[in-house]
Amino acid sequence: MADTEPVTVGARGQEGASARNADDSARMRSLMDLVTVMTAARDYDDILHSMAEESRRALAASVVSLSVWERERGRIRTLVNVGDLAAGIEPHPDEEFYGLADHPLAIRMFTEGAGYLEHRGDDASDPAVQRILEREGQDSCVGVPIHLDGRVWGELYAARDARLPRFTERDLDFARLVATQVGAGIAQAEHLARVERLVYTDELTGLANRRAFEDHLDIAFAQHRDAGDDVSVVVADVNGLKQINDSEGHQEGDNALTAFASELSAAASQVPGVLVARVGGDEFCMLAGGIPFSRVLTLAEDVCLRASTVLEQGIAMGVATTEGLPRGAMSASRLLRAADAAQYRAKRSESRTPVVAGHRSTVDVDSPTPDTVDRRAFRGRGVHEPARLLDDVLRRLDEIPDHPPALRAAAVAAELADNVDAAGWFVSKVDPVAGTIETAAEAVARAHSDRDSSRFYAVDEFPVEQYPASYAAATGLAVVVHVDDPRSDPAEAALLESGALLEMVMSGGRDLRGTQWLVEVVGDELSAPLRPYANVLRAALAVALRR
């Protein structure tokens, strides 16, 4: 074996090697950080943005862009820009494109998989890249392809301004490694997007499904609470679907659903921001946040007209909105229930136009249909006549002479509610100084919601000035509110609609200490009519509060 002379490395050479080793270690850490960011990202947009930010840090760049190659259009479309962006450059641009025809380096990159390195002012350079550097105030750049599923998917572009060292061939090699990790992130992002489409899409119609609708409804109400944006919900039910399934087969039933879904989607596309969903069976919903109710109502009317062209029996539609109500007076579940109750009224009256929650319907309240009578028949023991019920209530009060006024008022409410099979009752304290009506006790027999089966209303305190009928009842009057009665206070009727309720009787008065109380008994479709018992409530409370 031949002798070899030892290689002597000077101090400057040692420093350079140490610097390169430190730089390599930092770059390896950057690649690991890219993997960490990729696994922690939540959705497609989040992955794109996070990968771009980590790529900028790894490459010590001023700006980084991720773009997709749209082969069918022969152009590059930018998806995300991060860093010190020049004026007019958007982080998430809607319309940022670059044609390949005048961009030879990009053509070579996409067709051959080669990257490029450019410095501003180079003579033999790509004119398109030079224009980009000049427009964005950058001094050097690298561009490398992002591969996905064995082919070029898009481009990782990084640039440095004049304050930073110009990119070198070594930087270009490292950018290729970074692009490999970005490609893995893009693959994960597209997988998440496919999964999200499956999770949030109705398989039959291609519309959003119940889960997507409810998630967006929660988001819309968060915006309503924070910024006051109004929220409107439209519920539509396809009439006669069971008849179609029974007489013509389920395939024809599915065809009817998809035909209506197409019309619904086409109508909603005219109002940007409206979400359209099939929430189950023959039921469809539209959600509009921050859109004037007049426009939502026009859209609802258009949907009804379109439905009549593809469905023999059309649809039944109910509409509910927070517009005109105090912020916080409605919750997401209650708005949905109000729209659903309005939809039932539309179906019951065979209305071919939308029925709006809180507005008088086409059903004659004084002449209920047989269906209405059947649904509101009391279940259990027979309904006592008002005079007999008053006797029962007074006997009950005699049994609790020493109870506080609030408990005696609750006993009156409970007796009346039990007699008429009410949906629930409330006992509230009125504070004339603060101008509020605050719930002190309540009982709910049934609340028509799968999401919240224990409450009717979203808030426990209401401003007196918003509900004058309630305040009048608290002075000792007997007040009846029905959602279909045009004489009813609109604010009270809207509150009933928000809880999917039909009717309410209320009265109150002052106890011996001067505290003012209000008792409300509320009914739904299953309750006996409450109006005949208004004076029973008034008389019983006079005894209960003044004992």
Image (spheres, rainbow, N blue to C red):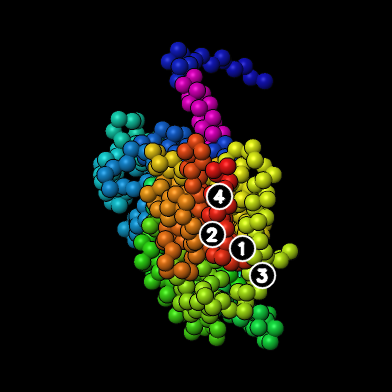
Residue behind mark 1: 386
Between discs 1 and 2, the one toward the N terminus:
1
**Amino acid type of the residue that numbered disc 1 sits on in the rendered structure:** Pro
Q: Measured from the top left, where is residue 195 in percent x and y?
A: 60, 56
Which span is picked out in magenta?
17-34
Residue designated by label 3? 377
Q: Residues within 10 Å of mark 1 (few under 14, many from 20)?
A: some
How far separated are the C-alphas under marks 1 and 4?
14 Å
Measuring 42% from the left and 58% from the top, which residue is drawn there?
Answer: 491
Is residue 123 placed above or below 11 in the rendered structure?
below
The x and y percentages for residue 181 are 54, 42
The answer to whether mark 1 and mark 2 are in CB contact below 8 A is yes
Snapshot quadrant of residue 204: bottom right
Q: CA distance from mark 1 to mark 2?
A: 8 Å
Return the x and y of residue 154 as percentages of the image width and height: 46, 53
Q: Main secondary structure of the magenta part?
A: helix
- Decide if residue 45 is on the left or right side of residue 35: left
Please, what secondary structure does the residue beneath circle 3 have? loop
Q: Which residue is mark 4?
A: 541
Q: Which residue is mark 2?
A: 535
Q: Name the residue at 30% across, 38% down.
A: 139
Badge 4 amino acid: Leu
